[in-house]
Amino acid sequence: MVSKNPAQSNPVDVSYELYRELAGEICAPLDDFDLTIDLRYELYTSKLTYLYNIQEQCFRCINSQEECNSYTQEDLVIIQNAIEVTKEFIRQTIRESLQNGLTIAEKKALDASRNKYNS
């Protein structure tokens, strides 16, 4: 009988070179002019997942006993700042979605009350 091992989550191996290419932009907002609120939310949550993955990789590199020629303490600070900024962009997106939803609900309520008095 074959025994099953519980699934272990392996951290995503994010290349340091890719991080370095994106480091100057990871705190910047997305160019979301033509994006729906749902798509913007999905992109920001994907970005947050990427940031958490490189944060873990950076932390492991900094704290490893082996010689590590990539991530530094400064990189960790940049990544942590980018995480906080991205969380704020997500909160803004959620607030905007709620405001839009309330505006639509208010319009529907106003229309319903007008229809009630016009009948």
Image (tube, helix red, strand yellow):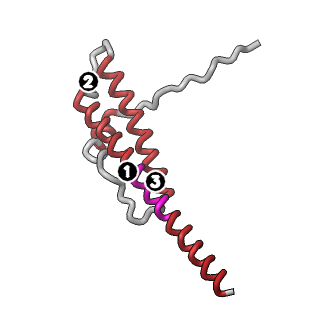
Q: The disc labelled 1 sits on which kind of residue?
A: Phe
Q: Where 27 falls versus 108 (above or below)?
A: above
| Figure check: 34 above or below 85 | below
Q: Where is residue 86 in the image (x, y as percent from the top left)?
A: 36, 46
- Along the viewing direction, whichever of 95 and 37 lies nearer the viewer: 95
Q: Residue at x 42, y 65 (%)?
A: 34
The residue labelled by disc 3 is 94
Residue with the mark numbered 2: 69
Q: Where is residue 105 in the image (x, y as percent from the top left)?
A: 56, 67
Which is closer to the viewer, label 1 or label 2? Answer: 1
Residue 89, disc = 1
**The disc labelled 3 sits on which kind of residue?**
Ile
What residue do we see at 36% from left, 54% from top?
30
Is residue 88 rendered to the left or right of residue 118? Answer: left
The label on residue 72 is: none
Q: Position of residue 95 (x, y in %)?
A: 44, 56
Label located before the other in sequence (1 or 2): 2
Q: Please, which residue is most extreme toward the front here?
A: 117
Q: For the magenta stretch, what is the residue range? A: 91-100
Judged left or right of residue 98, residue 65 is: left
